[in-house]
Amino acid sequence: MKKIIILIMISVLSLTACDKTLERYPLNGPSTGTFPASEEEALSGVLVSYKNLANSELQYSNFPTRFTDNITDIGTHRVGLRSWDYFVTSTLTQTNSDATYLYGRIYKTAGRIHLVLDKLDDIKDKMSEETYLQFKAELLCLRAYIYDMGCQFYGDIPFIDHCLTLEDYAYPRTPREQVINRILEEMDDDLLDALPVRWEKAKWGSCRIGRAAAYTLKARICLNWGRYAEAAKYSSKAMELSEGVYTLEPLDCTYYPNALTEGEPSASELFGFEGETCDEWMWAIQYNKLAASNVHSMVYTYSSRVANGAAGCGPSQALMDTFQCTDGKSITESPLYNWQDPWNHRDPRLDLYCLRSDTRINNVEYSTDPNAKQVRDYNTNAMVNNNDVYGNKSEYGPNGTKGPGGYLWRKFADKAYYGETLTTSYEDDLDVCIMRYAELLLIDAEANIEMNGGDLKRAQSDINQIRQRVKMPKITTLDRAELRSALRYERTVELCAEGFRWFDIRRWKLSDGRPLAAKVVNGPQYAPAFKNNLSNAKPTIDENWTVSYDPAQTWDGKDFNLRVLINMFFQTGKDELWPLPDTEIRTNPKINQEDQNPGY
C-alpha cells in the first residue's frame, strides 16, 4: 500500500506547478501545458497534491505543524534549536526561516492543486461523473486544509484559486473570514457525498480523504473559527458515516512499577506502523523510503541520544503534571498522588505518550541520571554508553544544559525500531496521521459544549469514550463549565504532540477575552534539575488544566528543585499570529510593510 501514491505520481513529480515555460507540448507524455489530459494523469495530479503535504521543512512532518506543540506550554525544544526560541519569546521576525517556509509550502501545495483543478472540467468527458466529482472534492478539501492553516498562522492571506503566471502573480490579502467562508462553501455537501466513506484500506490506507474525513475536516474548520453550530452539524454527520468504519483502537494500559525489568509501555499499535491501516486513522500523510526525499526525521528528532537520535523535543514538566491520577483528580487533589513515586496511579497516557527517566525506549534503558554512564540494551542484554548524559555532545541530551527539558515523546516510538540504531537524520517513513477518530469525538464534544442549546449528554458521551479506552473514570457531570474543563483536559493529553495545542490555546479564551496562550506562554518554563531529582514543585492546576508554579510552593517544604528552561513571553495583539514573510512583502506589489500583522 505504501508504494501506491509514490509509484503513480513519479511521472508528474518533475512538473512545475503552473510554470508554463514550454513552447511545445510533447505528445508522448504530460507537460505543464497539456497536463492533465486523461483520467490517469488527473489521478497522478491529485496524488502529487497529497504528496506536497509531505514536502515539509527538512522533511519533518506535515508542514511543521506536528512540531508546534513544542513551541507551547506543553512541549519543549532544545534550547537554541534553530530559530524556535523566537516563537515562545515574542521575538519572531518576518525573516524567520520557519515561518517563511510554511507560508511558501501553503502556496506551493495550492499550485499543485490548481494545476489539476484548473483543467479538470476540460477533461470531464474522459472519466465518469463519479470520478470527476471525487477528484474535485479531494482537491478542494486539500485546499481548504492548507488555507485554513494559513489563516490560523498568518491571519488574512491572499486567496489564490487558480494557476498563476508571470503576469498574474500579485494579489492582496483577503480577510480571513472571507477565506473561511469560501473554503466551506466549496466543500459543498453534495460534492463531499461523491466521496466514498473511506477509500479501500488495503489499497490506500488512510492517505486519501474520504467522505467521513471530509466532513470531519469541515467540522474542524468550523470549530477553529467558533462556528459551533456548524461544527456540531458536520461532526454529527461524520460520526454517522463512521459507524462500523472508524472506531477507537484499543491501547495496552499496563503500568510497569519496575519499568526497566518488567516491560515497556507502547502505543505503537495506534501511532506506529500498525496504525497506518488501523480503524482510528481517518487521514494521513504518506511517506516511503523507496522514493527520493519522501522521508522525514520525526523519529530521529524525538529519539533518545542512546539510540543515535537528536533528543530535540519533548513534553514539558507542566504537561507531566497535567495528567490526572487514576481516580480522575489532579495531582494536587488526589490522595493517590505521591510526589516521591509520581508515576504510579496516573492516567496511563502519561507513560504511553511521554518518555520519562528510568524506563525503556525501543527496549533500551533511558536514564537522565548524570551518574548513569552506561545503560542496558535489553535487545542484547549488553551495557552501552549512555549518550543521553555522558560523552560527546551530551549537553544536548534530554536533560543536558542545551537539552529540551528532561523528557522525550514516546507517542510515535514503534516496536519496529527495537534493536535498531538510527544512522541518519532522515530515514523515517512512518505515515503522519493528521486526523483520527478520537479528534472527531473531541470536535463533536466541544461544539456541543460551546453552542447554544448543545447536547451536553452527547458531549459527555464523546469524552467518556476516550477516557474509557484508557480505563479512566467516566465524567458524570452535565454542567457546561465542568464539561468544558473535561474537554480541555482531553484535548491536552489525548492530542499531545499531534500539533493541536498551538491552535487550541489561541481559540480558548480567558475571562478577559485574551487567548489562553497569554497566560500559559508567559513566564518561566520549568524542567527537572540536572541532578535527576524528582520534581518537588507543587503546581497550581486551573479549570483549563493549565499548570503554573510558585517556587515557594513545594511538596516537602524544601527549596524548589526545578530549573528554568526558558523564559516565555506572549504579547497580546501580536503573538496570536506569525508575520507575513519578508519575501512576500518585498516581491508582492499588492502587500506592503504597512499591511504586515500587528507588532511585526
Image (tube, rainbow, N blue to C red):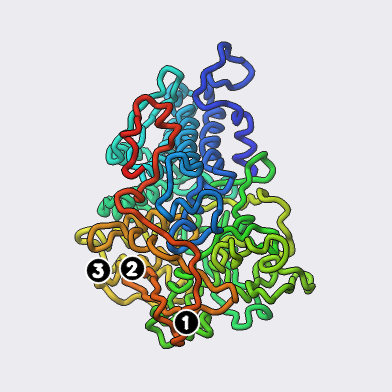
Comes first in the chain, label 1 or label 3: 3
Give whichever of discs 1 and 2 has the lower sequence position.
Answer: 2
- Left/right of residue 281 with respect to residue 90 in the rendered view: right
Q: Amino acid at mark 1?
A: Asp
Q: Which residue in the protein does label 1 denote?
A: 559
Q: Amino acid at mark 2?
A: Asn
**Residue 77, percent from left and from top:** 53, 58
Depth check, mark 1 against mark 3: the one in front is 1
Q: CA distance from mark 1 to mark 3?
A: 39 Å
Neighbor class of circle 3 (other Cα within 10 Å; few <14, some 14-19, many 20+) is some
Q: Which-is-in-front pick, marks 1 and 2?
A: 1
Q: Secondary structure at mark 1?
A: loop
- Residue 129 bears which disc, if any? none
- Observer-side mark, 3 or 2, equals 2
* Residue at point 54%, 58% (across, down): 79
Work out how far the residue at label 3 is from the one at label 2, CA to CA, in angstroms. Answer: 13 Å
Pointers 1 and 3 in contact (C-beta within 8 Å) = no
Q: Could you say which quadrant of the image residue 397 lies in? A: bottom right
Q: Amino acid at mark 3?
A: Arg
- Vertically, is 98 above or below 526? above
Give me the disc on residue 544. 2
- Residue 408 on image: x %, y %: 57, 65
Classify residue 459 as left or right of residue 61. Answer: left
From the viewer's perspective, is residue 26 above or below residue 175? above
In the displayed structure image, the side of residue 444 where residue 268 appears, left or right: right
* Mark 3, residue position: 480
